[in-house]
Image (tube, rainbow, N blue to C red):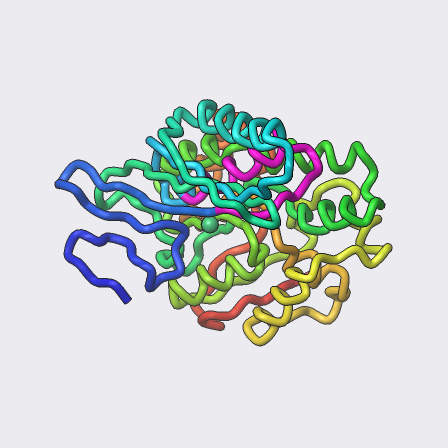
Amino acid sequence: MVKHPDLLVGNDTGDDAAVYRLDNNTAIIVTVDFFTPITDDPYEFGSIAAANSLSDVYAMGGKPLVALNVVGFPAELAVDMLGDVLKGGYDKATEAGCLIVGGHTVDDAEPKYGLSVVGLIEPGKEVSNANAKQGDVLVLTKPIGTGIITTGCKQGVTPDAVLKNAVEIMATLNKGAAEAMMRVGINSCTDITGFGLLGHLSGMTKGSDVGAVIKASDVPILPGVWELLEKNVVPGGTFRNMNGVDNAVDWDEAISDQQRLLLCDAQTSGGLLIAVDSGKVDHLISELETSGVETRAVIGEITSDNRGRIRVAG
Ligand code: CO
Ligand code: CO
């Protein structure tokens, strides 16, 4: 565990990014994220990977400033293809108001792409995943199910329209959601990515030393996910996530095995999960709407009992 007086958020809370204070007015947020292609389209892959990398800055309440490309690419694959990946990332970073100022590429058997991002925040305004309070309401800003949909795509069973919608959601920046939560003032936030909704919520409850209850039927699900679950389309990471959180989750009997898997589904570039004081939730929802955030779902709340655990109700 790294300790320093100016290190406001380090690696001990499982937060989305580190925060380092430069002076009383300025702190930098530093993060890196990259992964292998999730769709066949290189431009889409680039824009989703960039949105995903930028999201860790947004989850901390910050504003992305500059970024570096992190690239692994097979020498024998067409250079055009890499150009399209980088163009997707560049356009997405531009939308975020973030400059890509360089990067590094290595020869790699399987393509990989992402960004290392530096963002800005006023010291003390940074949002941790470890500060949720008893009675807080949990708000989620994107539907889940992207792991199941992209796995179905690799198996050739995801309908085009279902994939297209999921790609649009994954490529959507969490910028508007972050700006809305910062206007309102909230207690805790994390973005939903590889560990799935329950994995990231579990990080929040453990880090904050609180419990949580969520209502499975209130969790927004992408169209087409249930049909794929019925065909047993489930990514390996989702099974690992379920095993990983199972001893921290109390499932109501009404929750089916498929619902359990879905709540653990490994997400790519998912939404923000925000813990907000119950007196501010209406304000948050209206600010999310003002920011053009289409999904603003109240999915549960933070409890004082059941510390470090999650109850999933039907
Ligand atoms: Co994150
Ligand atoms: Co990340």
* Front residue of this view, candidates 55 and 299: 55
Q: Residue furthest front?
A: 76
Determine if the magenta segment contains residue 49: yes
Q: Residue at x 34, y 32 (%)?
A: 66
Q: Give coordinates of residue 77: x percent, y percent.
A: 64, 37
Magenta stretch, residue numbers: 34-56
Q: Give coordinates of residue 172: x percent, y percent.
A: 56, 32
Q: Is residue 26 left or right of residue 101?
A: left
Q: Residue at x 59, y 58 (%)?
A: 214
Q: Give coordinates of residue 37: x percent, y percent.
A: 63, 43
Q: Residue furthest bottom?
A: 247
Q: Visible in this render: residue 202?
A: yes
Determine if the magenta segment contains residue 30: no
Q: Is residue 251 shown above or below 230?
A: below
Q: Is residue 69 left or right of residue 171?
A: left
Q: Residue at x 54, y 25 (%)?
A: 87
Q: Give coordinates of residue 300: x percent, y percent.
A: 56, 54
* Front residue of this view, candidates 236 and 306: 236
Q: Visible in this render: residue 289?
A: no
The mark tally for this picture is 0
Q: Is residue 169 shown above or below 270?
A: above
Q: Residue at x 39, y 55 (%)?
A: 15
Q: Is residue 3 shown above or below 142?
A: below
Quarter-wise, where is residue 220 in the image? top right
